[in-house]
Image (cartoon, helix red, strand yellow):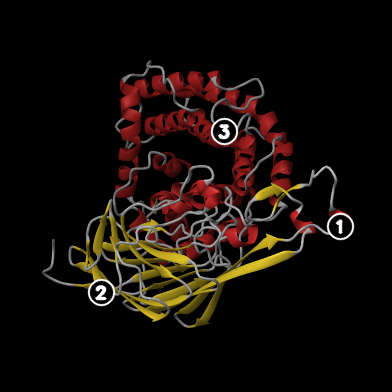
Amino acid sequence: MPTPLDHEFVRSAARAADRTAAPLAAAPDEEPAGVPHRGLARRVKTLIAAYRSPDSALHGSGQAVAAALTHLRALRAVQTRSGLFAGGDNVQSPPDSAFTVNDVCDAYVLAADAGPELAEATAGLAEIAGAATASLLTGGVHTPNHRWELSAALARLHRSFPDDRLLDRVEEWLAEGVDIDAEGLYSERSAVYASIVTNPALLLLAEALGRTDLSAAVERNLATTLDLIRPDGTVETLHSRRQDQKLSFALWPYLPHYRLLAIRTGRGDFARAARLAAAAGIDDPDLLAQTLLTPDLSRELPSPHAERLPRERYLSTARLAHHASATAHTVVYGGSDVPEHRRIRSGLACNPTFLRLFAGDAVLDAVRLSRGFFDLGPFRAADMERLADHRYRLTQSLTTAYYQPLPKDHRRDDGAYRLVDEGRFSASMAFPDRPQDEVSHTTRVEVDLREDGADLRIDISGPPVSWALELTFRPGGEPQGAVPLGDGRWCLTTGPMTYRVGDDEIRVEAAVETGEPLAGPDRTDVLRYDPGQDYTVAGGTDATTGNRVYLGGHGPQTLTLTLRASTVPGMKD
């Protein structure tokens, strides 16, 4: 027997839709100047869903219909002769247009079922969908998730306007295989694209094609994401290969997927995640349309499972580990793509943060290590080993060279040698043809994860170089026991120091095991974060913001660092 409807969830979804739709319906003839094509299509879908839903304040509203028609005309105006939509930096983009067509097709289903009141909207949506079909049928993509968004659009077109060529094209894309790894991560390792693109697209395709393997892939991804949910209700993004690797990404876009699969599978862990995703309230205007298109979404959740603590997981494919207890949630990361590819590039995992620590409201957002070695940038582990339960070793070895004169058989009278990138810089010097004198530098970081934090041992070996360890704390407190340097920066020598927010505290103690004493606050030339020449040559940076505490020195050196989380009742600021 189907579970009962969750009327409060549907009412919340309707209120979220109304917050977007009601102002549009209040001025139904107002032209939506400057709204991109994806925003126009989403507004049309939301207005029609509000018109259709008995829980919406706009149920049966003629003004909602009029506003939808106004936005439809604006959408048709930005559809080019190819059927693709104008706007954005991806010119004549089939996948970007697919996002819009997915909403157009959903709106068509909602409108076609509503009767004569929405006949004009139905016809307009069909016209837009028809004009886009040929370009989406033959068009290409340029990111992994685009394949599934485009395939979902083709499947939706077939749902309302049957054409076997559309399904044949979908099968061609799906024949490449879904890019999900052994740990349940998609190849882009991105919370943004998993939640907003890949998971919803694969769920639609699973339904349209009867492909249970596609819904199983989504279930695997959601199961892995459970271990990436942080105490502040966000999803870990350090390991991402997309834009969100430097952002904090909220859990709420995962709500419909956790909710739907919890209802269909009975998984209490998914039900807990769905409740957590909605804990701050429902503010997604698209959820109402989803409840109308997928009625299972409106049913009551199964009983949620309690969170299991302590727990630990190591995602070997992304080289990301976390340990969660009632006291601390610690993340260790050693999966950057930069050491292998030797460049900063869109589509690579580039974030140099290798540790985070959550202690209630006190949060150590980022631990990073700069080294003054040929301006090659901060420590990004090329290797991560699990030494034992709770223990990991991160390693990076950098090698560069000085070049000897060219051998006689490679010399040219005109001095015009090949322009070559040698990994650090480019020059017309035919570097591969020259004998080299190599200079190497190795950094090892061993991390022992504990119930109340972490112990770090940092070993910097090789030629003498300056280094700086940066600890970036989330705003809300102020370091006590460190020397202020100004501009949100502090210096720590051998500590200890504490960072307290409310009752929650992170304590830091450092000790030099081998090498010179730590740099004092007068060494601001050392106590700084250096993003490396890949950023500075273009005047850029990937520096963090927040309260930044620095330890520094001159290697070779071995440093130990103790991080402890605790609660100190009665110590509120």
Q: Are marks 3 and 2 in contact (CB under 8 Å)?
A: no
Q: Earlier in the sequence, mark 3 or mark 1?
A: 3
Q: Which residue does the numbered mark 1 point to in the structure image? A: 408
Q: Are marks 1 and 2 in contact (CB under 8 Å)?
A: no
Type of the residue with mark 3: Val
Residue 567's quadrant in the figure? Answer: bottom left
In the image shown, does 126 or 424 lie closer to the viewer?
424
Callout in the foreground (1, 2): 1
Residue placed furthest toward the left: 570
* Residue 23 visible from this viewpoint: yes
Residue placed furthest toward the bottom: 388
Q: Which residue does the numbered mark 3 point to in the structure image? A: 101
SS for dot 2: loop
In 3D space, how far apart are the residues under numbered discs 3 and 2 (Cα atoms)? 58 Å
Q: Which residue does the numbered mark 2 point to in the structure image? A: 496
Callout in the foreground (3, 2): 2
Which quadrant would the C terminus be assigned to in this image? bottom left
